[in-house]
Image (cartoon, rainbow, N blue to C red):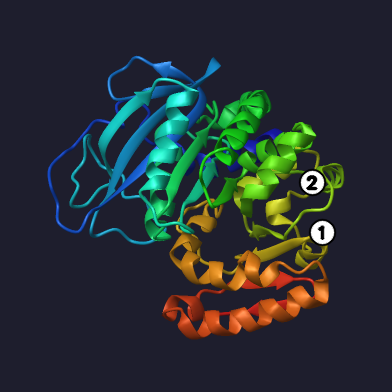
Amino acid sequence: MRAATLLIVFAILSACSGRPEVGALALNEDPVAGARVNDILIVTTRQRDDRPDTYFSGERSAAVNYAEASISVPPSHKPGQIEWPESLPGNPKTDFVARKADYIADKAAFRRSVNARLASLPRGERDIMLFIHGYNTRFPEGLYRFAQIVNDSQFQGVPVLFTWASRGKLQDYVYDLNSAAIARGALEETLVELAKTNADNITILAHSMGNWLLMETAVQARPENRRLVAKHVNDIVLAAPDIDIDLFKSQLKRIGPMPRPFTVIVSRDDKALRISRTIAGGKERVGAFSNDQELAELGAVVIDVTELESLDSTNHSKFAQLAQLQPDLRKALGSSALGSSADHNRGANLGDDLGSFVGTTAQAAVTLPIKVITAPFTYASGGY
C-alpha cells in the first residue's frame, strides 16, 4: 500500500522534472528591447559536461568548478515564472535565453570576478546574494530559477549560484542527499571566500534540500570560519526547508545563538515535502511545519504562504513568487528592524516597519495571502 502511494505521489511530482538537461545554455544574442540580462557567477560540485552548451551534469566532481552565465528574461515575463523555450536556443522576446556562458579557471579567478563586479557598485550597496537549490534540480533549472529570483527582486548586487550535484531525477533522492552531504566542505569554502571579498552584505537563500546542506555546513564549519561568515551575512532565508524538524532543532542548538533572526518560508500544502515526510518515517519537515509560532520561538521570522496559490503543481516553489516583493519585504524584515536581541523589542520594531510595508507596496502586497510571524508579533495580509 505504501509503495502504491509513493508511486502516485511521484507521478504528481513528475511535473518538476522534464526541464532541458542537454544544450540548455545554447546562446541567443538577438537584441530585444525590454529584456533584462542577469549576470550570474557559479560555484559547483558538479562534473563538467562536454556536451555542447551543457557545461555541468548531475554527477559529482572531485574538485570545485566555477563558471559564469548571463540569462536574459523576456519583456513579457510574469513574476514567479520561468518562461522555458519550447526549442533551443529560445526566443528572447518570449523566453528565458542564455546570452553568455563560460568556465572560470579557479577559485582565485572567481574571487577576482566577484570583487570586480562589487567595485562597480556604490559603496554601501556592494551586496552578494548566494542561492543554494534543492533536490531534483538539474543545472539549468537551478540557474534559470535563480535568474528569475534576481530579476523579480530587482537585485542590483552580485548573484552567486551554489549548485551541487543533484541528478534532477525523482528516484535519486538518496543520491541527491549524499551529494548534498559531500558538498558541505565546498559550501563552507565558498562562504569563506565570499566573506573575504569586498562585499558590504551577503544574503543566503536556500531552497528545499539546499537548506539541509546549509545547516549541516554551519554545524560542521570550523568555529573561526563560522565567526568570519557571521560578520558578513545579514540575511538568511530558508525556503521550504526539507529538514526533519527534530534535526533542525538539534542543528540550531549546535550552531548556537544566531546574531539576528533568520527567515523561514513555510507552506503546509507542499506536496514535495509531504512525500519527503513519508520517506522519513512521518517526521514533519520544517518547510511544512504545522506550528508557525514554535518556529518563531526558535529565532525565525516565519512567512507562511499556505494560502498562496502556487504556480507549480507541487506547491514547492512558492518562495519564488515572493521575489517580486523583496524590496519592500526587506524593509519590513531587514536587520535594522530585527536587530534587537529582546523578543519584545523585535516585535515592536517589526510592527512599525510592516505598517510602512503595507503602505508603500503595490496591490500585490495587500492581496497576496501571506502571514508573517515573529515572537511575539503576528502580521497577516490578504486572505488572513
Note whether residue 248 is visible.
Answer: yes
Left or right of 90 on screen, residue 242: right
Q: Find residue 99 and report its horizontal and vertical position in percent.
A: 24, 38
* Amino acid type, mark 1: Leu
Which picture quadrant has residue 21? top left
Q: Find residue 222 and report its horizontal and vertical position in percent.
A: 77, 31
Does residue 240 lie above or below 137 as drawn?
below
Q: Find residue 328 and report its horizontal and vertical position in percent.
A: 50, 72
Question: Helix or strand or loop: what does disc 1 sit on?
Answer: loop
* Amino acid type, mark 2: Phe
Residue at which label 1 appears: 298
Q: At 44% across and 53% down in the image, what residue appears? A: 149
Mark 2 vs mark 1, CA separation in Å: 10 Å
Q: At 66% across and 23% down in the image, what residue appears? A: 182
Residue at which label 2 appears: 248
Q: Earlier in the sequence, mark 2 or mark 1?
A: 2
Residue 33 is labelled as none
Q: Find residue 47 and report its horizontal and vertical position in percent.
A: 47, 18
Does residue 73 lie above or below 310 as drawn?
above
